[in-house]
Amino acid sequence: MAHALREHGRERMSEAMTQSALTNVALAVAGANYATGINAANQLAQYALVLPNSRQNESEADAIGLELAARAGYDPHAAITVWEKMLKATQGKNPPEFLSTHPSGETRIEQLNALIPAVEPLYLSANKASKTQQSKTSVKTN
């Protein structure tokens, strides 16, 4: 949901257009070395533009998701537990972060831990409002 709210799909389209432009420039420079130029441009775009932006989008979506969950009354600390379980399940099977479209589990845990102090009041407020609503409902039914 967070990816949709932040329109990451639209950003991907823009990235694809930029990658295409880089490829065209590389082709113009490469001339006869057509295949070498295309490969070089694609590699450059992948490592310099696509992967870092993808990881940034994932981190942004994690932050938005954490806030949405806290506002809905879900404990933000549970996000840490999820990533700890993911790390345990995928131990040693993930590529280095710089080669990945997603931040590493360790990076995600670090980023989420940094965000928890900001969203914890939202979680506490949501639970307080929920308890108040439940209290009002039980008074009306008695």
Image: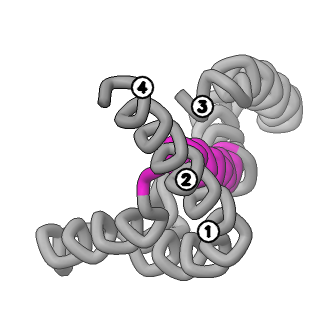
The answer to the question of whether label 2 and label 4 lie on touching residues, with beta carbons closer than 8 A, is no
Q: Secondary structure at mark 4?
A: helix
* Quarter of the view holding residue 79: bottom left
Residue picked out by circle 4: 140
State the extent of the magenta-drawn residues as a range. Answer: 50-74
Quarter of the picture holding the C terminus: top left
Q: Secondary structure at mark 2?
A: helix
| Residue 5 in the figure: left or right of residue 124 | right
- Label 3 vs 1, first from the N-terminus: 3
| Identity, as a three-letter code, of the amino acid under mark 3 | His
- Mark 2–mark 3 distance (CA, rounded to whole Å): 17 Å
Using the image, determine if residue 76 lies above or below residue 63.
Answer: below
Place of residue 71 in the rendered image (x, y in percent of width and height, measured from the top left): 59, 46
Look at the image and say whether residue 134 sits in the magenta stretch: no
The answer to the question of whether label 3 and label 1 lie on touching residues, with beta carbons closer than 8 A, is no
The answer to the question of whether label 4 and label 1 lie on touching residues, with beta carbons closer than 8 A, is no
Residue picked out by circle 2: 70
Q: Nearer the viewer, mark 2 or mark 4?
A: 4
Residue picked out by circle 1: 120
The residue nearer to you, when weighing 139 against 71, is 139
- Label 2 vs 3, first from the N-terminus: 3
Q: Residues within 10 Å of mark 3 (few under 14, many from 20)?
A: some
| Identity, as a three-letter code, of the amino acid under mark 2 | Ala
| Residue 13 in the figure: left or right of residue 69 | right
Residue picked out by circle 3: 3
The answer to the question of whether label 1 and label 2 lie on touching residues, with beta carbons closer than 8 A, is yes
Residue drawn at the location 28% of the way across and 76% of the way down: 84
Residue drawn at the location 58% of the way across and 40% of the way down: 39
Using the image, determine if residue 48 lies above or below residue 107.
Answer: above
The residue nearer to you, when weighing 19 against 138, is 138
Place of residue 72 in the rendered image (x, y in percent of width and height, measured from the top left): 51, 42
